[in-house]
Amino acid sequence: MSGEAPAALLARGLVTELVRGGVRHVVLSPGSRSAPLAYAMLAAHDAGWLRLHVRVDERVAGFVALGLARADGVPAAVVTTSGTAVANLHPAVLEAAHSGVPLVVLTADRPHELRRTGASQTTEQVGIFAAAPRWAADLPADTPPAATRQVVVRSLAAATGARSSDPGPVHLNVAFRDPLVPDADWQPGDRPAPREVVAVRGSGGTVDVPAGGRAVVVAGDGAGPEAARVAEAGGWPLLAEPTSGARTGPHAVPAYRLLLAELGEEVERVLVLGHPTLSRPVSALLARPGVDVVVVAPTGAVWPDVAGTATRVVGGVRVVPGDDDGAWLARWQRAGAAAERVLADHEELDGLGVARTVAAAATAAHREGRRETLVLGSSMTVRDWDLAVPALPQGLRVVANRGLAGIDGTVATAIGLALATGAPARVVLGDLTFLHDAGALLRGTLEEEVDLQVVLLNDRGGAIFATLEHGAPERAASFERVFGTPQEVDVAALCAGYGVRHTAVGSRAELAAVLAEPVVGRSVVEVTLDRTDLRDQRARLAASVSRAVRPGPAGQRRTGARTSRRG
């Protein structure tokens, strides 16, 4: 083996140490300079060391790896060749950085003597992802085995947050010198023994908070079941985003962002867990002077405090006995029940109706023991779920790329989750989010099939902007061109081109019937929506909820006037 090409030896050493450190999945986007890694990864796949997935598009590959890593928190790797291929990983790297996902980025590069010489496909790859990686290293073409081992150990410790409690992406830029083809096939043999990096607990301390008082618990993305436990222990309302992992139990309040207009001014304390990003009313509450904001952030050097109003940033909360007569929680629960009645009477086939229909189907499947992952688009879709969907069953997994809240890579992320979990994934998204990532539907003929169902809300443009200041009537002249961005893509034809089943539905009943079937293979369920009256419709809904939650006769079952536009 001593006569083997140095590039092959370096690649094999990297693969061995990655497997030793726990990496089980690698996504490869083919290229010439990355050939040593491709050969080594394939050999490791054939030996059962890891699972290799191949994607022709680097951006898609990055998000598939992101989904693989998000599934269980185990680092997944993505491999590309040099040049623009590396730049195409940037969206996934940024999402991993802000979501705390352990993504290992392996980028092949020209040897140092060819850099800045005009060599083909050669650019400044070192530092190309700026401050996003938790760790970055540039491995020369002659890196010895001991140095390779040390770099991988440190990079995986950084990726998992074993020492920092701040997981995220790492970037290993690897120079390979010709020849790039190994002299002989590699026979990896038995899987290398695992290597353990000692973890440390996050700092910040645990504080005692008395139960009761006019407090609420805000559970943002990734908060986890701890948020629900804290709310129940303290007797507090739980304002949980759909991807928080805490939107469960009797303390989870439906349509909470609309209720803040009625009850928000009375809030005296907010306990924040996770990464809340969805609601302007919640952001306004957190920024309001006089509110005691306690941020619970067990790990990481960065914690959510956009307005800079947090009075305490702590590692954990212990709820101790306090003065709680249950009246505060009961008011929120009554208001939430009233809002839920309004939403239940909302018959429109729109984003809210689709959210409730999909959530009901997912809940039924979960109770029947069918494991599914729900993936939500980060624009209008996740906000519709936040508004319309009541409490979800414990253990039902709902995911969105909320680290940077971009629409990029949603379908590819779902594919990665499905590959890693072996369970079907249902994706709910709008047309622009779908079209941005339609290439992820492509499956190589040698790649394994995934069970993926895309529920596409096609309103032929950017609906979310209609609900923001850009959609105000006085801006109507410019809205469609630069915000609505209308499109007329033939989705059925697009699906046919990718070999994906396509079903069009025209009612919530039709949608429910399709969703009742198990998810098998790749399919798209297209729901055509009308966004022309969206702004006014949402204003009418908010007014209906406001009337319903007010105390006194005006708030008693004011749901007879339904919000549907159908006669």
Image: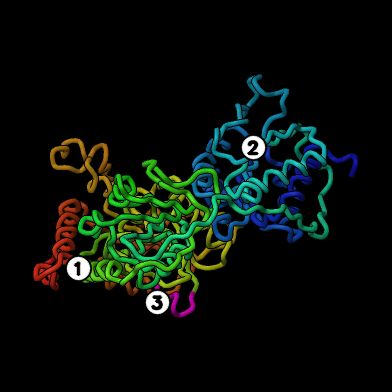
Foreground disc of the pair 3, 1: 1
Residue 160 at least partly seen: yes
Mark 1 crowdedness (10 Å alpha carbons): few <14, some 14-19, many ≥20: many
State the residue in front, 336 or 502.
336
- State which tag comes first along the sequence, 2 or 1: 2
For the residues labelled 3 and 2, the Cα–Cα distance comes to: 45 Å
On the image, numbered disc 2 is attached to which residue? 136
Q: Give the range drawn in magenta.
A: 362-370
Disc marking residue 364? 3
Residue extending farthest to the right is 2
Check the image and report above or below for 352 versus 9: below
| Percent position of residue 488, x then y | 28, 48
Question: Alpha-carbon distance for marks 3 and 1?
Answer: 22 Å
Name the kind of residue labelled 1 in the image. Val
For marks 3 and 2, give the one nearer the viewer. 2
The reply, left or right, for residue 542 in relation to residue 155 is: left
Q: What residue type is labelled 3?
A: Ala
What secondary structure prevails in the magenta region? helix
